[in-house]
Structure formats: structure tokens, C-alpha cells
Image (cartoon, grey):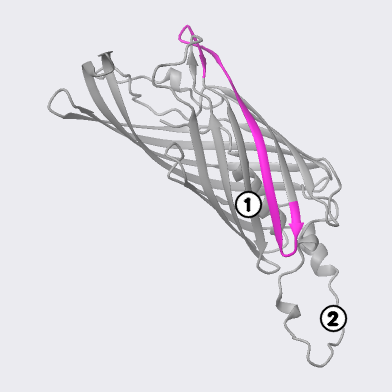
Amino acid sequence: MKRHGLMQPAIYASAMLAGILCSAGPVWADTASSSEAPPSKPVGQAPAQENRPPAVETLISTTGVLTPAGQFTIEPFIQYIHSSSSIAAVQGFVLAQVLAIGNINIQQYTNDTVYTGVTFRYGVTNRLEMDLKVPFVYAQQNTSVSNLTNNGVQQAFNSTGSGLGDIELSMHYQINQGGNGSPYYIANLQVKSMTGSSPFSMPTYQSYPAGILEQQPTGTGFWGVQPSLTVLYPSDPAVFYGNVSYLWNIGHNAAGTYISPGNAIGFGFGTGLSLNDRASVSLGYSQSIVSPPKVGGITPPLATTLEVGSFLVGWSYTLNKSTSINLNLAVGATRQAPDVQLTLRVPYTL
């Protein structure tokens, strides 16, 4: 079963990119207020200049790409994640890597998770932004276990869980001034708490030896720290972005055993295209390489390195000077990635 505590770095970069291209407030207000009537055109010149997308440089505030100093944004969001997987487990031992003695089970998981909540953003300075994300989670897992050594007998286990998720605190700092043909460099630091219920505190079904959970947790059960670097490069009428990150999942003692969930190296890249003065689209890709977990300092026999890759598509539309709508879709490109991840955000600037 896959769990996703921190937002994947490339998905965050895509979300921030959508905010740049279709940001509410001063960005669009400055663009509108500075527009003047174009000079008369020479004979024979195509009169389509007014309809071309505006230069990306004009869509980025002169104060930078982050929330301007003193500006406060409330961003309600809802996210749906669907994933499925199959695991073949041998409960026993293997002789000469040929003959398996014990029970052979095929476990099929289907997970549906809904995150909803609010993100609060505040511009401390024109180059420093602080974010606080408060999620509420509803999770459902359907598990089917087929015992191949017992005439294919199947067992079904269904469990749900809901409540407060893991609260996240983020800081973003614009390193350089950027613009005029130069990229923007953004340093990010994200910290995930353990405010959600832990999977280690959930009851398990006693009828199955593997210990399938009777109730789904709303948190990962670990603190997480994720530094990352985002690069934005405007090129009219597009913005190219890239992101690299390292996720440190902090291990701790659970039920008398020290458990380390494994860390992750991530990267992402993509581009955002301005369609007009209100709408934009973005395309990208994200990849995370997750090291195997360790229990008591030992890597479990079936644990392997995970490759979590997703294709990203985003749409953004500015409703007015204070409100915009951002829709992001991530489709799994590797077996370990969620099948579908759909996120709707509606930032409102006070």
C-alpha cells in the first residue's frame, strides 16, 4: 500500500507555476493598468497583435514570483487519489529457489483517498513566503486475498478512516531577482507533521496473518522534511520549470521497534503556456526514487526501491483580481505511482 505524505516536488512546482501565470491580485492588476492603446499600424501589417497571449514577463509581478509582502491568500483545495496494486506473498520458506513451502497469497489493493482543507499563504517579504496546509482526510481500502495453495480461496477486507491529516508548514525564498532573460531560483523547505492518525496505532484483522488494517489512518506516522530547489525560466509566451528535491522521512520507535520508512530523491520538469490574459495550461513530469524501508535496522526481504513517476497536466483560469481556479491532474507513469491524482484549488487573495 502506497502512502504519500508530502506533496511531490514537481506537482508543487506545477501548482506554483499555475499561480504565476494566473495569479490573482497585483499581477493582473499591474498588467491591466499599464496597458495603453497601440499605435496605428502600417498598411499591410496583420491586425492580430491584440489577440496574441501577453508576454510572460508581464504576468510575473515586478516584486517577484512569490506572494508579495503583506499579502494574505486563502486557498481551499480538494484532492482525489486512486491507486491499485497486486502483491504476491509467500508465507513460509523457499528451498533452492524453486520449491515454495507454505502459503502463497495474492493480495490485491484498491485505495481511494480524498484530501480536503485549506492552505494559508503569507508574503513575509517580496522574496519570502510562508505556507500552512491543514488537510482533512477520508481514506478507503478494499483488499482481496487469494490463497493459491488452498484452491484459490478468497477473502475480502474493507476498511475506511477519516479525520485530520498531517499538517504541513512550508517556506519559499526567491534567491535572485530574475527577469530580463534570467531564470528565477526558488529555495523551498517543507515540514510535515504527525497530526494525522498513525498506521501503527490502527487495529488489524486477526483472521489474516499479514495484519491487514481494520481502519485506515489519516497520516503517515512519520515526520518528514523536504528541501527542494525550483527554477523558473520565462520565454514568451511560456514558462519552463524544473525542480529537484530530497525527502527525509524521520524514523522512530513503533511497538518497540525502530522503523525507518525510507527517503526519496525527486525531480520534475515541465512548461506552462499562457493562452490569454486569464487562462493558461501546463504540462510536466515528476519522478521520485524512494529507498526501501528498514525495520530494526534490517531491510525486509520483499522491500525494494520504488520508482514513482507521474505525467502532469494543469489548467488555470483567473475569475477576477482576487480569485482564480487551478486544476491539476497527475497520471501514474510507473507501477508504484498512484493511477490518478486530481487536485482542485481555488486561491482567494484578501
In the foreground, 64 or 90:
90
Residue at horizontal 70%, vertical 61%? 238
Q: Residue at x 56, y 16 (%)?
A: 251
The quarter of the rendered structure image containing the N terminus is top left
Task: Work out which residue is located at the far left of the displayed protein and give it.
Answer: 151
**Would residue 279 be visible to someone looking at this image?**
yes
Density class for disc 2 (Cα within 10 Å; few <14, some 14-19, many ≥20) is few
Residue 348 in view (yes/no): no
Q: Residue at x 78, y 91 (%)?
A: 44
Specify the principal SS of the magenta part. strand
Q: CA distance from mark 1 to mark 2?
A: 33 Å
Residue under pointer 1: 270
Disc 2 residue type (three-letter) = Pro
Snapshot quadrant of residue 55: bottom right
In depth, the one of 81 and 10 nearer the eye is 10
Q: Which residues are magenta?
A: 233-260
Disc 1 element: strand
Q: Is residue 220 left or right of residue 60?
A: left
According to the image, label 2 marks what residue? 38
Q: Is residue 103 left or right of residue 186?
A: left
Pick out the residue farthest to the bottom.
43
For mark 2, give the secondary structure.
Answer: loop
Q: Confirm whether the magenta stretch covers residue 301.
A: no
Q: Position of residue 321 (x, y in %)?
A: 73, 62
Q: Amino acid at mark 1?
A: Gly
